[in-house]
Each structure stands twice: as structure tokens, then as C-alpha cells.
Amino acid sequence: MKTIIQPPVATKKDKKLSIHNDVRIDNYYWLKDRDNKEVIDYLNLENKYTKHIMQHTEAFQKNLFEEMKSRIKEDDSSVPYKLNGYWYISRYEKGMDYPVYLRKKEHLDADEEVLFDCNEMAKNHAYFNLGGISISPDNTLASFSVDTVSRRQYTIQIKNLITGEVYSDKIKNTTGSATWANDNKTLFYSMKDEITLRSHKVFKHKLHTNSETDSEVFHETDETFNTFVYKSKSKKYIIIGSSSTLSSEYRILNADSPDGTFKIFQKRTRDLEYNIAHYKDSFYIISNCDNATNFKLLKTNQNSTEKEHWKDVIPHRNNVLLEDIEIFKDYLVVNERENGLNKLRIISWEGTEDYYLPFNSETYTAYIGNNPDFNSDVLRYGFNSLATPSSVIDYNLKTKKSEIKKEQEVLGGKFNKANYVSERIWATARDGVKVPISLVYKKGIKLDGSNPLLQYAYGSYGSTIDPSFSTIRLSLLDRGFIYAIAHIRGSEYLGRDWYESGKLLTKRNTFYDFIDASKYLINQKYTSNKHLYAYGGSAGGLLMGAIINMNSELYNGILAAVPFVDVVTTMLDDTIPLTTGEYDEWGNPNEKEYYDYMKSYSPYDNVEAKHYPNMLVTTGLHDSQVQYWEPAKWVAKLRELKTDTNTLLLHTDMDSGHGGASGRFESLKEVALEYAFLLDLEGIRA
């Protein structure tokens, strides 16, 4: 007889939280203590319960894992790119979890030099991530960084690429990225605050010295800003950047003079955002200055960098978002977005050419790829869609000829992109705004309301989820699922205003758009509420928590990955990573107006006694972005108050953080769990 395990019940220990004459009682606040054995025991109990409930799907999970893995080319390599006389390549070898980084001098048929074998480096670590690799200008040294905890706190080291020796220099608690000055012995890097993990200082390290003697070159004292450091593509400048949600500031230093003093490019001003790129004797600036909501491109002399000297190159356009630029010696490439779709614009510096690369698809993703060589005549870009595997394409700017350098292989012999349909439809939100939805499904299915549909969205920070291809997703599509991406407000899919109308005191638009998209998909017979599922992670997990508090009846199941659900408490705690830097996204709840609005939608604060959908919630014990206790507290409160008998599961990865497991295929096991959860609810078990 099968043993029935009851759901874990977290102990209630009331904690009063008071501000603005408002008192909240948090019975599960105690779960914040990662070092408390009672907390770890509770998380382990939840994991045991999840394993028990999903036990009947274990064989199916293994099959799903093998199926997803079998589509991926195990012995795969990146498309080589050339930088400073060397071709750089990353390669996966059959049966291995991690990449091998190598290079070849001048020619692709030259002998390969192995820079880093991450499979060797990862041995004896439950988690491993190689951070930024930075090659010195003379090609003899490489700085690299490693995280073995999954808190995104990297230790930087330096390797001699001639002898293979890893020097004793060790720099702890960094962001992982570093950049060399042109003297081949000075390294600039950014450091994290030990408590908040905010990137707050830039240091200068001299080769073969103790990192404790490193010079601090910049301290970002504003807790709403993060700082970073890099070298311009032209190799002339070391650049320190500082950014918040609404403002940015840069400092520049000639890379030939690493002991010099950084000069402020343009001092920070509230609501002024800008990015810079160096070319010849000028800087090109992408900025929202002068009310350029969708950003414009400007230019200024490298010796006169203040805003009053900036001159328009590409003026602001109300219907086109200027996202990025790539500078080559003879051409400027502009990445734009119009009506939600990416466009790559080619402009010759001499002014004789100005045109767009043609993309003749209803919904797709195109992006500028890795182009580190300033002198190249070749633009590398990527293209894919929900039904079209990814391609890496080299476009010759002189001859206008394209060459597909690599098209993603889907192994197994079963995939044919002609068997799938991708489309874009538009739902009408409650305020009359049209919300785009990208869809993919297997050709031939009947739109009669009986199809299972997984609806995904993110909707925060202006982060746009483009409709991209996934071999993993085929395991759902081939079993009859429709997959939908709702391009809701809070992203920049339809321009900067689309983001501005889904943050701060308009954040509810994000949730309403998702819900109204769900209703539209049901009304148009793509699915029904008995077969509709929703998925979101991190800030998208907040979205999941909000929509089920508002309209739980629309969904049969929810996947919430590392969900940011305890919004008010987190945003009131400035010791937690990310909090202070996010006041411009969510609001500062120390101000009553923002507190009241935030509390009105905060998932944890609005759990009530009612029916909720079936739910699988996942988190990582070492998550630095959304702390594990948010989903743990949320699940505990849902267990206490929900009035249904639907499944509610919490799975905590005790070894990882925000990005999940580190091995190439290890993360597929969590996807297999999620997919098995969805498919089981549909009665699909093979």
C-alpha cells in the first residue's frame, strides 16, 4: 500500500511589521534564516513532499530528460571569432557538462591552444561557473573568474597563456568581469558589497601583487546605482560606468595611461540615460536626452564630452526604439525595434549607404552578434523564430553577401520546421490597448478550446522577451501544447513607453495585460481555463503570484521559478541584494504612496482563503537575486489559506542560485520536472 505523505506545515511565528501606521503580520518571517536548522529541515521536507507527489512521473521525467538531451548536439562548437590575431572558440565534448575554451593563432587550421577546460575546473564542485575571460593586449595573459557557490560572487585569477601557470594573484568578491590596460600588467575590475552584493567599487590591480593592496579608483556611494568597468572597442579608453534604472554616468581614461585620473564624461542627471562608443576622435552616444523617449544617436568630440556639445546623428522617432549600435571602421550598424520587431540598419560612415537587412517574417528575433574586431568588414548577427532554429550569419558589408556560419542542429531526425506554425496575434486589454502575443504550435491542431497552452511572460525592467527557438520546448509542442509569449507592458517590445506604462504606479498594467491576453486566448479557442497554464520566473514569478490572486479561475496550473513574491518586505530591507537599485522600478515603500500601491498587488501580502491553481514553485538556496525565503514563505502561506485540494509543490535546489544548476545538461532535469508537472495535469504521461 502506498504511503501518503501529508504536505509540510510550516510553524507560524508571528512577526509584526509596521510602517506608515500600517501593521502586517508575517507568520513565516523566520524562514529568512538560512543558518537555522529548522529552516533547512523545512525546505528538505518540502523537497521530500515534491518528490513523493511526483514519484509516479519519475520514469517520465527521465524519458523527458533524455529526449531533450538527445536533440542537443553534445560535441558542439561555437562559431570562431577573430580578435587581435587569434581565433577564439568554445567547444563542448560528448558526455561533458562544461565548455572548453581554446584559440588558434591567425588561421583556423593552426594548432589549438586550450585556454580553460571547465570540466577539469568544475571537478569536486556541486556548482561551477566560469565568469568573464579577458585577454591581455599582447595575448600572453588571461584574467578569468570563478563562482562555485552560485551567489554571483566571483574570484578573479590570472593565467599565463604561454606557460600555463596560474599566478597567485587572487581577487575575491568581484562581479567576475575585468579589463586590461594597454600596458599588459594593470587590470581593472569591479567589486561587490559583501552584504547587498551591489557592485559598488572599481579597483586597479597590478600583476604579481597582493589584491589587498589594490588601488580603489572609484566608489559608487549612491545605493541606487551599480558600477562596472570595460574597455572601448577601439581599445583607446578604459570606461567606468554607473547606472540606475533612470540615470547613467560614465568616466573615461586613456588605456595607455592606467595610473591617470578618470574624467567624467557627462555627470549624472535624474532621468538622463546614455551609453557611449568611441570612434576615431569622437564618441557616439545613445541617449534619451531632450525628451527622446525612444532614444536617439548623438556625437561629440572626445575632448568635449559634456551634454551641451552633443549633436544629433539619428534623431528621435516616436515609433522606433533605438536599442544598440555596433561600430566598424567603415560602417555603423544600428539595432532598432519597430512595432515589436528587430531591425538591423547599415550606414556607411562616408554617407553613401543607409539600408535595412531584410527579414520577411511575421514574428522573429534578430540581434547583433559578437563583433569584437573593429577593422572587420563583416557583421555577425543572429536570427531565429519560435519555429526556426538559430542561425549565426556573417554579412559582408562591402559585398552585401551573407553566409550562414552555423545553423542550430536539432538532432533525432524528427524535427521539421514546416511542421510548426508561428504567428502573432493582438489581444485588447481592458483599457483598450492592443497587447501582442507570439504563438507557436504544431501544424494541424484544431483551435476548439481543447488544447493545452503554456503562456509565458516577464514584463519588468524594460526587458523584452523576443520570440526565439527552443529545442527543449519541442517536448511540449509535440505533445499538443501551444506556447505563447505575451509581450506585456513593463517590457520595451513596443518601445520605451511600453515599459514606462508597466512600472511604479502603473505596474498593475503588467498583470492586467497578462490576464487579458489569457482571456483572449480562451475566447479565440486556442485553449480553455481547464487547459491554460502560466509560467514566469523572477519578476515574472511576481507576475504569476499577482495573476492568481486576481484571476485564479483562468488557470489550471502555474509554474513559478525563483519568484519575487514578497515585494513589500524585500523592498523595505535595504540589506538585501538589488533592493536599493530597484526603487525606480517598483517604487520606494518608505514613501506611503508607493507602499500602499505595492501592497495592493504584492503576491505574498494578498494570499487569501480561496481556490488556487495547481502550482510548482522552484527556487535555489543560494539565490542572490530573489532570496529563497520569498517562495518558501509564499508556499507556506498558500498552504495555510487555500481552500482547494489542488497540488502545491515547492522544490528548492540546495546547491544553486538564481540561474539554477550549472552543468550543461543538469538544468534539463528541472525542466523535465516542470514539464512532467504540466503534462501530468493534462493526463499525458508518455
Image (spheres, rainbow, N blue to C red):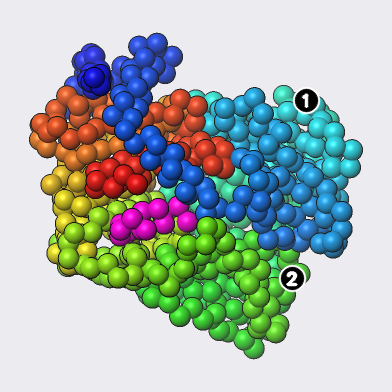
Is residue 476 shown in magenta?
A: yes
The structure residue drawn at horizontal position 52% and vertical position 31%, both measured from the top left corner, is 151
Q: Which residues are magenta?
A: 471-484
Q: Which mark is residue 262?
A: none
Is residue 459 shown in magenta?
A: no
The structure residue drawn at horizontal position 46% and vertical position 68%, both measured from the top left corner, is 416
Image position, residue 587 (x, y; %): 31, 43
Identify the residue under disc 2: 376
Q: Is residue 92 left or right of residue 163?
A: left
Q: Is residue 82 above or below residue 563?
A: below
Q: Quadrant of residue 184?
A: top right
The structure residue drawn at horizontal position 17% and vertical position 61%, both measured from the top left corner, is 449
Identify the residue under disc 1: 210
N-terminal of the pair, mark 2 or mark 1, is: 1
Confirm or deny contact between disc 2 and disc 1 (CB under 8 A).
Answer: no
Give the residue type at disc 2: Ser
